[in-house]
Every structure is written in C-alpha cells, then in structure tokens.
Image (cartoon, rainbow, N blue to C red):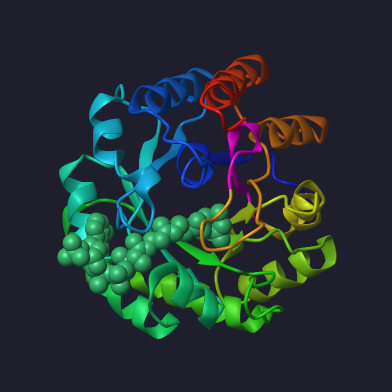
Amino acid sequence: TLPRRVRIVEVGPRDGLQNVPVTVPTDVKVGLIERLLAAGLTAIEVGSFVSPAWVPQMADTAAVLARLPPNPAGRYAVLVPNLKGFEAARAAGAGEVAIFASASEAFSRANINGSIAESLERFAPVAAASRAAGIPLRGYVSCVLGCPYEGEVAPEAVARVARRLVDLGCHEVSLGDTIGAGTPDRARACLAAVAGVVPPERLALHFHDTRGQALANIRACLDLGVSVIDAAVAGLGGCPYARGATGNVATEAVVEALAALGIATGVDPARLAEAGRFITGALARAGAG
Ligand code: HMG
Ligand code: MG
C-alpha cells in the first residue's frame, strides 16, 4: 500500500547549490530557504561543513545558519564528513547532521578521499559526538544504482553500508542515486534488498534525474514502506565528484505527483513555485541559468 503522507527533505540549498558554476551570495541562500519554509517545507538541508578547498560553494554555511529564522516545525540539516565538520556544525547551531558514505569504493575515494571502511571509521567519532550533543544523525549512501567510475553497484553492497550507518546511530538513511542511473525495476530491487536489513520506515529515497527516471523510480518504490523523499526545488543540483550528473528530482514535480496519488506532503505548490522562481532567477542573473 502507498503511504498516506510523505515527508519531503528539501536538499536544494545544499545538493542543489554545491556545484553551481557561480558564487551564490549568502543573501540568496537565506532568501531561498525562507521561501522554502514559507512553502511548508520543514526538513531543509541548508549546507555542508566540508573542506572549502573541495567544495567552495558551501564555505558560507555557518553564515547561512546564523541568518536563518528559527525553524520550530522542523530542522536545518547539514552534511559533515568528519569530526572537524561536526564541531563546526554544532557551533553554528545545526539541527541535524548527515554523514555520507558510498556503496562504491571508487566514488568514496573521489568524494571523501578514503575507502568505504576508512569513511566509516571517520564517522564513528562523529556519531558519538552527535549522540553526546543530542543532535540527530542522518546517513547517506551514494551510488546506490550506479557509480560514475565503477558502473553497476550490487544491492547487497548498498544494504551493507546502509546497515553500518544505522548501527552507527543514524535515525534515517537516504539512498542516493547520485548519477541518476536507476530504472524503476532496479530502484525497487535495491530498496527491497536494503529493506531486508534496515526497516523501510528508516529509509529515504534520493534520486537524481539525469535520465529523467526519478519520478518513475519513486513511484516504483512507494509501496515498499518508505515515506521520506529527498528533492531539490527547481531540480537544482549535481555532485562535483560525479561528472555529468544533473539535479535532484524537482520538489515541485514530487509534490504534484504525490498529490495526484492522494498522498499529502504539507507543501503549498504555489509558494514552492515562487521559491523556484526566486532561485532560478537569481542564478540566471548571476550567469548560471
Ligand atoms: P582530505 O584532503 O583528505 O582531508 O579531504 P584532510 O583531513 O587531509 O584535510 C585537508 C584540509 O581540509 C585541512 O586543511 C583540513 O583542516 C581541511 P589545511 O590544513 O590543509 O588548511 N578540512 C576541513 N575544512 C573544513 N571542514 C571540514 C574539513 N575537514 C578537513 N569538515 C574531506 C577529506 C572529507 C575533508 C574532503 O574530501 C571533503 O571535504 N569532501 C567533501 C566532498 C563533498 O562535499 N561532496 C559533495 C557532497 S556528497 C553528495 O553530493 C552526495 C549526496 O547528495 C547523496 C547522493 O546524491 O548520492 C549526499
Ligand atoms: Mg545528491
């Protein structure tokens, strides 16, 4: 059966903006996040505390958090790759931190400069620190339906990493089709394999739309017990370490497709469209439209 309600995790300000070819001013990021809040989105990933040499676009995440209004209905989340990132996130008042591992070795090295095992070792102190600080911990597995360097990725490899993230203390694990390589049948098979070792209520779907399959993939997975979907307003996005990967599935499209299935999201489509116009207009004026 389909879920009655889906929680959308808006990742546009992070996944969407981490890779745009122009510098996005802090003002614009804050303006975008305020509009996303006004549209009814409560779980918003606002940035990351990663090496600014690796991802310069996210270097102002502390400044973004400092200027955001309170988010009583939800949380402002950030990505952290290590303890240094966690400490910065805590100091900046992040409401949730997310660690990010990969199901493929080659992508793990390209994205976070370490093997899968090394990355999990780095995450252990982050998990301990987040637990001690009472900051909820989310996890990502990247390349769940294909890797830009290794090609196909086995569902068992995804399941193994997802389980490790839960064992570390992640309350939720998001399954990332980083390069949008998935098809509905493979997405469903992957989710089914992971759901064998992690309860599907603790999983989220994170599809990029490189080949236009993201909505179909979501639809194929929705009756397997998952009810959290990551999406980016205006379909912004891409990953700097996955060349050619385009944006996340557009939040607008997800909200509309779910509404057509009778599934509530709590998001106001008109206000969401306004947030989309705001950011696409700002990017176009900056020369990245
Ligand atoms: P490294 O070079 O091996 O790190 O990078 P290091 O520990 O050797 O440190 C090198 C320098 O970085 C040092 O500075 C550190 O202080 C600094 P220096 O002494 O040379 O001046 N540094 C930091 N600075 C700020 N914040 C930090 C931090 N850590 C170290 N947290 C590292 C390893 C993990 C840091 C690097 O590879 C990195 O930052 N990677 C992040 C890559 C990234 O953000 N990728 C995009 C997000 S993942 C994604 O998009 C996929 C997802 O959407 C899901 C999906 O679609 O599948 C989540
Ligand atoms: Mg992503």
Residue 50 rendering spot, x and y as whole percentages: 32, 56
Residue 121 rendering spot, x and y as whole percentages: 30, 80
Q: Is residue 161 left or right of residue 48?
A: right
Q: Is 161 within the magenta?
A: no
Q: Quadrant of the C terminus?
A: top right
Q: Is 233 within the magenta?
A: yes
Q: Is residue 130 left or right of residue 29?
A: left
Residue 80 rendering spot, x and y as whole percentages: 32, 57
Which of 187/203 is in front?
187
Q: Is residue 248 above or below residue 65?
A: below
Instruction: Return the residue found at the far front.
Output: 287
Q: Which residues are magenta?
A: 226-237
Residue at 60 percent of width and 39 percent of height: 236
Which of the four quarters of the rendered structure image does ligand 2 lie in? bottom right
Which of 288/81 is in front?
288
Residue 173 visible in the picture: no
